[in-house]
Image: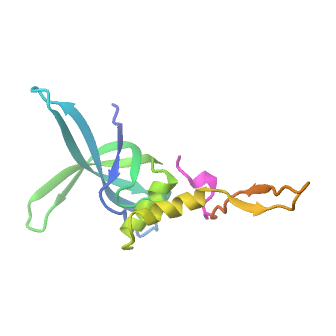
Amino acid sequence: MYNKVILVGNLTRDVEMRYTSSGSAIGKVGIATNRRFKSASGELKDETMFIDLTFFGRTAEIASQYLRRGSKVLVEGRLILEQWVAQDGTKRSRHSVTVESMQMLDTRADAQNNQYNNSGYNSAPAAPQQQASSQAAPMQQQAPTQNGVNQNIPQEPEIPEIDIDEDEIPF
C-alpha cells in the first residue's frame, strides 16, 4: 500500500515543541492550503483546508527554529489517524500528516518580514523591507584613486553564521 501526502501552504501558528522522555523532539503545527476552482455557475471560488502536521527529531528542531506563523512550506509525509479518549469519556479521532521531509519556500526577505510581524514589533510595514533590501545590497568601499579616477570596489555583505551541520538539514 502507498500512503504519501504532499502539501504546500502557510503555517497557521508557530511550531509547538515537546520532547519525549528520551529527548527526541516533537513539533506540532497547522498548515493552511488553498484551492481555487470555478463553480458550476462559472464563479471563481477558494477552498481552504486546515491540516495538522507533526515533525519529529532534527526536522522538528529546524522547523521550530526557522518557521513562524505565515511561513510558506512544502511538506511530504504520510497520513495518520490519531485516536484518543476525551476527558468526558468520548472517543475522538482526527487525521493529520506525519512529516517525513520539509522544504522552506519563503525567501530570506519574507522570513524576515514574518519574524518582524510575529515578534510584536509595531513598526511601519516598510521598515522590514528597507532593512532586508539594505542587507541585500553590497557595501561599497572607497578605493585609492588611479589616474585621478575614484574606483568603488564591491564587498560581500556579512552573512550570519548558523550552528547547523549540512548533514542535519533535511533539504
Look at the picture and state if 41 lies above or below 133.
Answer: above
Q: Position of residue 75 (x, y in %)?
A: 40, 45
Coloration of the structure image? rainbow
Percent across and percent down for residue 99 are 39, 48
Magenta stretch encompasses residue 164:
yes
Q: Is residue 55 magenta?
A: no
Report the number of discs: 0
Locate residue 112 relative to residue 140 in the image: left or right.
Answer: left
The location of residue 39, given as percent across then percent down, is 13, 29
Q: Nearer the viewer, residue 39 or 153?
A: 153
Residue 141: where, in percent of width, then height? 76, 62
Q: Quadrant of residue 122?
A: bottom left
* Image: magenta residue range: 162-171
Residue nearer the viewer, 80 or 151: 151
Front one among 58 and 156: 156
Quarter the N terminus occupies: top left
Image-based side of 65 in relation to 152, left or right: left
Q: Which residue is the extreme one toward the right? A: 147
Magenta part mainly helix, strand or loop?
Answer: loop
Q: Is residue 50 left or right of residue 4?
A: left
Q: Horizontal placement of 75 versus 137: left or right? A: left
